[in-house]
Amino acid sequence: MLTGRRGITFQRTKTWKESPDPAFDTKLERIEYAVNERPDRTFAFDEFGPLGIRPTAGSCWAERNRPDRLPATYRPTHGITYFQGCYSVGDDKMWGVNRRRKGIDHTWAALRTIRAARPDGALIYVILDNLSAHLNWKIRRWAALQKVELRFTPTYASWANPIEAHFGPLRQFTLANSNHPNHTVQTRALHAYLRWQNDNARHPEILAAQRRERARIRIRIERGIRWGGRQLTTEAA
């Protein structure tokens, strides 16, 4: 019988989706250019959810032989919310808001806050995925008029969005091992963490959580280094 001593261990299998996007490399190069060459003008936008009100397992410090316990049952009577986050690559700052639903109007509102973050009117880049609310023609027209260049991630490549690595610590420090009584308390916890993260962006625990999240979403496996192979020196078409 083969054992770990011979370099083989018993492991779980995992799956991933190969991107069928014909513009896969082109889209990644456009994102790489914005992140590496124009970080002070680059922002990332995404959302996660649904967020319900229920006991959520996690880990925490606790007194020896007296582990923290969460109830195993709950009644889903509070509905759900979605967290929309905006991340400034150059400033290493993130802000966000909880919404009761996804929609074009909320996406538009988030993009307006990003445009307002650089009010000089110069071109900015916004990285986001291919959700239908992001692809709407009204948003595209507004973006063109406001000098907001939308740079979409390839299909099945949400890991290319810089904000994804920041969502991991956000969930870990606010949702894991929690039992929030309602959405108001949950939202306050999310915003309190954002304020702390923006003041402590280089904190070792934040950096460690970001590394774990990048590993989870397979950035290094998919592209080899953080944002993909080569560093670009000219604007991608």
Image (tube, rainbow, N blue to C red):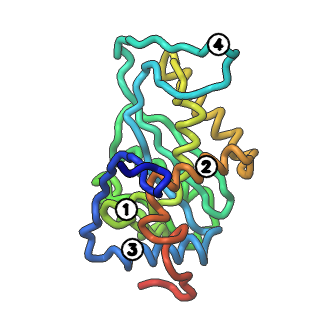
Image height check: is 237 above or below 123?
A: below
- The residue at 39%/46% (across/down) is 10
Q: Amino acid at mark 4?
A: Asn
Question: In terms of sequence position, does the residue under pointer 3 or pointer 2 come before the other?
Answer: 3
Kindly report the distance in space between the C-alpha atoms of the residues bearing marks 2 and 1: 21 Å
Q: Which residue is mark 1?
A: 157
**Viewer-nearest residue: 98 or 136:** 98
- Side of 229 where 100 appears, left or right: left
Q: Which residue is mark 2?
A: 94
Q: Amino acid at mark 1?
A: Ala
Q: Which residue is mark 3?
A: 27
Tell which tag, 2 or 1, sits nearer the viewer.
1
Dot 3: few (<14), some (14–19), or many (≥20) neighbours within 10 Å? many
Q: Position of residue 107 (x, y in %)?
A: 41, 49
**Viewer-nearest residue: 112 or 125:** 125
Q: Amino acid at mark 3?
A: Lys
Tell which tag, 4 or 3, sits nearer the viewer.
4
Q: Which residue is mark 4?
A: 65
Question: In terms of sequence position, does the residue under pointer 3 or pointer 1 come before the other?
Answer: 3
